[in-house]
Image (tube, rainbow, N blue to C red):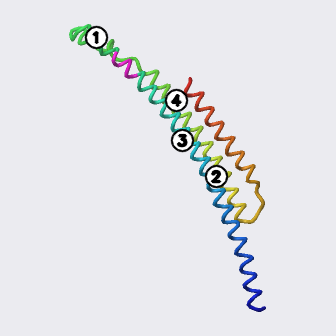
Amino acid sequence: MNVETIITDVKTRGEVVVARGQDVVESSFETLKAANAIVVEGVKSLLDTNVAAGKDLLAVAQTSFSKAKTDGVKAVAANPVAYLPEGKDRVVAAYTDSVAVVTKTSDELVKTIKAGYETISAKIAGEEVSVAEVTAEAKKTVKKTVSKAKKAVKA
């Protein structure tokens, strides 16, 4: 074996490694982009739900305070329970919605990251992977998350 053959062999193998590395970086970026969209929509939905609940609780508390202020100290001292704000149902609903959003977001995030990991593993091993399929799957997951989040916010 002469030096030229060795250099040619190293170049050929190096080009394969570089090409696979570029594919891995592209797949990683697409996976992270899809995961970021899922997390952002989940956090946005969570924030919207809790802000709406907070506004409702504040309104109920202000109404209760106004009632207590109007009725006077003696009336409040005689029956303090009557002046407590009725916000338990709203807090429980916000908590339930929050748990549902976090669970759904985590499931979608796991699916996306798992698909990305499988794609990256296949590319490192040199197997053919359809980038279009993985990208389409990630986009589909993101669109579902966005539509569900919008429906949850409207409700």
- The picture places residue 131, in percent across and down from the top left corner, at 73, 53
Q: Decide which of tag 2 and tag 1 comes sooner along the chain.
A: 2
Q: Name the residue under label 2.
A: 30
Q: Which of marks 3 and 1 is in front?
A: 3
What whole-number distance in Å separates the C-alpha atoms at marks 1 and 4?
Answer: 31 Å
Q: Decide which of tag 3 and tag 1 comes sooner along the chain.
A: 3
Check disc 3 and give the amino acid type: Val
What whole-number distance in Å separates the C-alpha atoms at marks 3 and 2?
Answer: 15 Å
Alpha-carbon neighbours of circle 3 within 10 Å: few (<14), some, or many (≥20)?
A: some
Report the predominant secondary structure element of the magenta stretch: helix
Q: Quadrant of the N terminus?
A: bottom right
Check disc 4 and give the amino acid type: Thr
Q: Mark 4 points at which residue?
A: 96
Vertical order, 151 against 44 (above or below):
above
Check disc 2 and give the amino acid type: Glu
Q: Which residue lies furthest to the left in this view?
A: 74
Q: Do the residues labelled 1 and 4 touch (CB within 8 Å)?
A: no
Q: Decide which of tag 1 and tag 4 comes sooner along the chain.
A: 1
Residue located 56% across and 33% down the image? 100
Q: Disc 1 on helix, strand or loop?
A: loop
- The picture places residue 72, in percent across and down from the top left corner, at 23, 9
Vertical order, 11 against 136 (above or below):
below
- The picture places residue 90, in percent across and down from the top left corner, at 46, 22
Q: Nearer the viewer, mark 1 or mark 4?
A: 4
Check disc 1 and give the amino acid type: Asn
The dot on residue 40 is: 3
Residue located 57% across and 46% down the image? 36
